[in-house]
Image: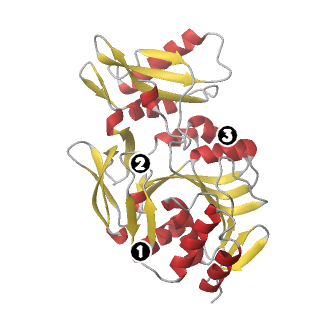
Amino acid sequence: MTSGRIEWNRQSWPATSMGAKEFERTQGRRSAWLGDVAEVWRRWCAEEEPGLAVTTSGTTGTPKRIQHSRKATACSVAQTAEALGLDEGCHAVLALPTTFVAGQAMVVRALVGRWRLTLVEPSAAPSWAGSCDFVAMTPHQTLGWLEHGSGYATTLLLGGGPVSPALLRALLASSRVSTVWEGFGMSETLTHIALRRLDKVQDLAAPFVPLPNTCVTVDAQGCARIDAPDREVHGLSTTDLVDVCDDGSFVWLGRRDDVINSGGVLVHPMEVERAFHTFCPSWVQDFVVYGRPDDTLGFEVVLRVQSAEPPEDLDHAFQTFRNQLKALVGSAKTPRAVEWGDVPRSDRGKVMRRALS
């Protein structure tokens, strides 16, 4: 049985235990990120437990150390390969740091699936030569790749942050990628446990579909509760507000802490943003819904839009937005104000609503 290959700096190593030792000896000390790759590679080939060990991003609380068994890790990588049709011999690019779960999982996918894996130094604008079959990146990386990087991909998996309409439009028009997927997951679930395909901007309002033998339910607070027994995830409580559909798919509504109490009406910013996705004009580059303190309501709902080329009659455009949103979400959830300005995002592309509130 042939092994896969790991490539870096015009060199190639067999994706085996011997290859890992040679890579670690010759490349592992050249930089921290290469050393991290070598460690994940070596540990997996040595059949050590745990299969993966990562530190959470800290998005929903204090960062913590998470460990996953080899059995759970093998299930995760197999589900990704099957869901996305990634067969033996697949040429993938590793653009994510292996300090996080998604990067480590990519290395293991290549080892288990006998892939050809090209290593790219993690950055905000990844680049590689020619075309690959598969790459996973954050939205922030993807924007940098489109604007400043090089390379092509048949399949792109987005995760680690929200996908803006402007980014998706740019991707679909770029001819740099054939198929775009978005994943829903976290370090605790060993990467994505649900996927949705993004063929058009309106798909940003579509539900996520759980992977096989994975169930997402709602707790008393409206937050997702995840059961993925194949990954040894049982009753995992989250702060992600979701709306579960009859077929088991679900719509992500946002974080529980982001909910806006406007005059006693609880408004999920993501619900309003999803509605705006359905008619958002092409001149809008980015947007966000947030709560602004108000003497009467406690908080008022505000829609902020960002664009380099606004229409001449901006007030008319804003009033049109409000009328269209009122028909979709009702008057109580319709933004009382629409404003012009930048949308603050973190380095990983996540909206920083608290910087606006």
| Secondary structure found at label 3 | helix
Q: What's the CA distance linking mark 1 and mark 2?
A: 21 Å
Mark 1, other Cα within 10 Å: few <14 / some 14–19 / many ≥20: some
Which residue ends up furthest to the front in the rendered image?
A: 29
Numbered tag placed on residue 347 in the rendering = none
**Image location of residue 50, percent across then percent down:** 41, 74
Q: Is residue 184 above or below residue 311?
A: below
Which residue ends up furthest to the bottom in the rendered image?
A: 1
Mark 2, other Cα within 10 Å: few <14 / some 14–19 / many ≥20: few
State the residue position of label 2. Answer: 58
Q: Do the CB atoms of the residues marked 1 and 3 lie less than 8 Å apart? A: no
Of residues 221 and 282, the one drawn nearer to the viewer in this rendering: 221
Amino acid type, residue under disc 2 in the picture: Gly
Q: Is residue 297 left or right of residue 315?
A: left
Q: What's the CA distance linking mark 3 and mark 2?
A: 29 Å
Dot 1 or dot 2, earlier in sequence: 1
**In this rendering, the label closer to the viewer, 3 or 2:** 2
Amino acid type, residue under disc 1 in the picture: Pro
Q: Residue at x 38, y 56 (%)?
A: 64
Q: Is residue 300 left or right of residue 105?
A: left
Q: Residue at x 40, y 77 (%)?
A: 71
Quarter that holds the C terminus = top left
| Secondary structure found at label 2 | loop
Q: For residue 170, which quarter of the picture?
A: top right
**Image location of residue 189, percent across then percent down:** 39, 60
State the residue position of label 1. Answer: 50
| Secondary structure found at label 1 | loop
State the residue position of label 3. Answer: 170
Q: Is residue 189 above or below residue 115?
A: above
